[in-house]
Image (spheres, helix red, strand yellow):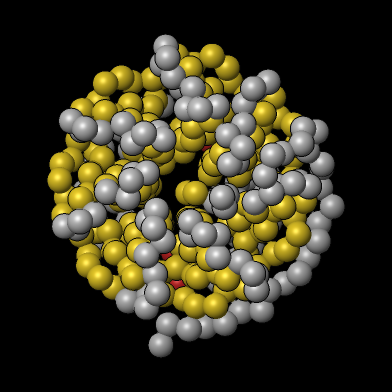
């Protein structure tokens, strides 16, 4: 009863070429909330190669580890869409609840995790059957989700509770909840699973949390309304979107200080790092495009036109 098929709309849009060659050739999947669509960017050419219809005001994105599926949260459709990346079309819709936003997929690809903003829960969905496994109570208004590299833990940013919860993925229970800054939203984890970096929208800062003890170890001041975070260059740089500044803050992980502020498009939201660990993609909501940053030179090297209201909240680049 979950299956609803959509025909992909094939639109090839000429955009700026990347000035620096990329080592790999995955695709970036950009949710366009106001267009009810997902733009597919070929990261090797810097072009939008397809546009996929996804109803329900798509926002959050999670790419399956094998790249075969993309899961896109659809708040107005009360769930998420399953996109087949080979067919480039939505092949199923799953009803979860009214407040779906953040979405993530486990490292083994067997489970999908969906944060419900209104119900204060995380739903665990079987990726094969698309059936609910369990609903886990967390803090108020859960938003960003991230799975640890070893697939052992799920971390949840609870916006209204000003906290982050750590969920044991073996028992599907909350292990611990720790206070962070004001209105945490997007978060990321380092390659060793030792630290998470949490963007706090209202306190204009990033909380660094040590995962073993679930203790905050630092607070880094950034700029207005930080939304999401990503790591690059062997986890030596943290990049943070600042919505109201139209910028990305670059943090040196050794010193935990801002070393640069890069101007991007208007209202930058989602941010994710290419598998080459160097190029960082930023979805600009108000400008309806994507900025590509070279994390070595700290410059924008391309701007790619996408669809109206590009958000791409989550892990939107395949491996």
Q: Position of residue 28 (x, y in %)?
A: 63, 51
- Against 318, is 282 above or below? above
Total number of numbered discs in the rendering: 0
The residue under the point 66% across, 79% down is 7
The residue under the point 55% across, 69% down is 83
Q: Quadrant of the N terminus?
A: bottom left
Q: Position of residue 145 (x, y in %)?
A: 36, 48
Q: Nearer the viewer, residue 22 or 181?
A: 22
Give the left or right position of residue 240, taking residue 118 as reference: right
Q: Nearer the viewer, residue 61 or 45?
A: 45
Q: Position of residue 17 (x, y in %)?
A: 82, 41
The residue under the point 37% across, 65% down is 110
Q: Quadrant of residue 177?
A: top left
Name the outermost residue toward the top: 255
- Against 37, is 157 above or below? above
- Against 213, is 99 above or below? below
Q: Quadrant of residue 31?
A: bottom right
Q: Position of residue 255 (x, y in %)?
A: 42, 11
Give the left or right position of residue 251, taking residue 124 as reference: right
Give the left or right position of residue 42, taking residue 236 as reference: right
- Against 280, is 52 above or below? below
Q: Nearer the viewer, residue 252 or 183?
A: 252
Question: Does residue 125 appear anywhere in the picture?
Answer: yes
The residue under the point 22% across, 65% down is 135
Q: Quadrant of residue 16?
A: top right
Question: Does residue 98 appear anywhere in the picture?
Answer: no
């Amino acid at each position: 009863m979950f299956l609803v098929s959509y025909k992909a709309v094939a639109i090839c849009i000429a955009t700026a070429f990347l000035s620096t060659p990329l080592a790999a050739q995955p695709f970036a999947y950009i949710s366009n909330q106001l267009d009810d669509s997902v733009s597919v960017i070929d990261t090797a050419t810097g072009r939008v190669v397809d546009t996929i219809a996804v109803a329900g005001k798509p926002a959050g994105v999670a790419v399956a580890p094998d790249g075969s599926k993309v899961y896109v949260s659809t708040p107005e459709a009360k769930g998420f869409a399953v996109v087949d990346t080979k067919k480039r079309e939505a092949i199923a819709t799953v009803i979860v609840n009214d407040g779906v936003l953040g979405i993530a997929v486990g490292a083994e690809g067997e489970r999908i995790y969906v944060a419900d903003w209104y119900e204060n829960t995380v739903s665990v969905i079987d990726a094969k059957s698309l059936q609910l496994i369990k609903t886990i109570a967390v803090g108020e208004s859960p938003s960003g989700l991230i799975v640890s590299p070893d697939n052992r833990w799920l971390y949840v940013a609870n916006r209204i509770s000003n906290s982050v919860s750590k969920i044991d993925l073996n028992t599907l229970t909350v292990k611990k909840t720790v206070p962070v800054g004001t209105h945490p939203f997007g978060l990321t984890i380092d390659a060793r699973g030792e630290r998470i970096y949490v963007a706090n929208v209202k306190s204009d800062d990033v909380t660094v949390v040590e995962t073993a003890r679930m203790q905050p170890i630092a607070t880094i001041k950034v700029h207005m309304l930080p939304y999401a975070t990503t790591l690059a260059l062997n986890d030596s740089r943290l990049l943070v979107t600042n919505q109201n500044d139209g910028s990305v803050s670059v943090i040196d992980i050794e010193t935990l200080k801002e070393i640069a502020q890069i101007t991007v498009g208007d209202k930058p939201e989602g941010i994710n790092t290419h598998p080459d660990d160097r190029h960082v993609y930023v979805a600009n909501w108000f400008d309806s495009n994507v900025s590509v940053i070279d994390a070595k030179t700290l410059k924008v090297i391309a701007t790619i036109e996408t669809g109206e209201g590009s958000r791409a909240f989550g892990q939107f680049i395949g491996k």
